[in-house]
Amino acid sequence: MNDCGNINRTCTDKPQRANQFIPGHEPFVAYLHRFSLCPHNRCEKVLLKGNLPYNGRHCEIQLDPCASEPCSYGATCMSLPESKFSCSCPPGSAGEFCELETSEGGDESGITLDFKGDSYLEFPTLPNAAHSLRVEIWFMTRSLNGLLLYNGQKPNGVGDFIALTLLNGFLHLTYNLGSGTATIACLEPVRIGAWHSVKISRIKNRGMLQMDNGEVVRGQSKGTLLELNLGEPLYIGGVPEFLPLKYSLVVQVGLDGAIQRMIVNDEVWDDMLSFSTDQRNIEPYNGPPCTPGICKNNGRCIPILEDYRCQCVDGFSGKWCNQSTFKNR
Ligand SMILES: [Ca+2]
């Protein structure tokens, strides 16, 4: 084996736009990242780069090309053959990392929800979570502590669970598959009042946490059990009563802040309120970026973390829907 084994490669970092067809998925525009042969035959050079699909002293460990979580803004990373990946953009976005807004957005609700610390939203149990799970949440907090997400197995807090909490300003992903609790904490603190995106994913006993395209933090739960067995509803922003969960949750207070968007297993939950099964003390959030009246002529403001776009009604266009398209006819 040479220095880099048989698979010495480095990322050219030049994505190529292409139409992609993956069985089981709708056709989508992808931005392919290609990996070329490592020119200097040195693993060190390869390992310095974060977005590479190989790891290990001799690059002998092939990682999923999506392992570096290269896609954001609600996009899903898809592993493709030959160590390529692509970002599959949700409706209304495009670009290499889905960072560009398009006018073809779906009928998004655009309603940001305010949580008061004692609020919660209840949903059916997280679907298909046994082997793997991916969740992205766009949130703002006014407090350094609070619960963002909780889903358990039994009402008394016993059994498997997964939780995403803010503890002293740091995001924590905690889960237990039945043989020990894993806790994975972000290295960077949240900023009070700022919009953040957080991505969590779990494959069997391995978990990942990432805030705002920062460092990907990984961990795994102890023991031999690999399935997350959930039976209770999913709770967002808080739970009805923290007391039964006190052994699994250090944080005993709900989110004091707001949630813009949730993406669960590739699905954008546009209108969270309409398909929640129960709720307490939830109100629309009227703070920035979608302050009232920012979009003119009945345009609808769609928040995108700290940015926004206006979805105009017929007859108007422009960034703020302040240009009439009628007078030109
Ligand atoms: Ca289990």
Image (cartoon, helix red, strand yellow):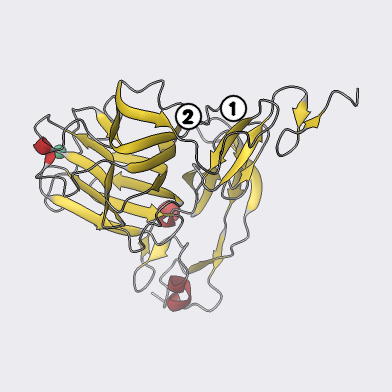
For mark 1, give the secondary structure: loop
Q: CA distance from mark 2 to mark 1?
A: 9 Å
Where residue 299 appears, as percent x and y from the top left, is: 66, 28
Question: As drawn, which residue projects farthest toward the right?
Answer: 329
**Which label is found at residue 270?**
2
Q: At x 38% / y 59%, what residue is drawn?
A: 216
**Which label is found at residue 106?**
1
Q: Residues within 10 Å of mark 2 (few under 14, many from 20)?
A: some
**Which label is found at residue 22?**
none
Q: At x 41% / y 39%, what residue is drawn?
A: 259
Look at the image and tell me whether residue 159 can be seen.
Answer: no
Please tell me in which quadrant of the rendered image residue 34 appears: bottom right
Above or below, comparing residue 80 to residue 284 in the picture = below
In the image, what residue type sits under mark 2? Asp
Quadrant of the drawing holding the N terminus: bottom left
Above or below, comparing residue 197 to residue 105 in the picture = below
Q: Pointers 2 and 1 in contact (CB under 8 A)?
A: yes
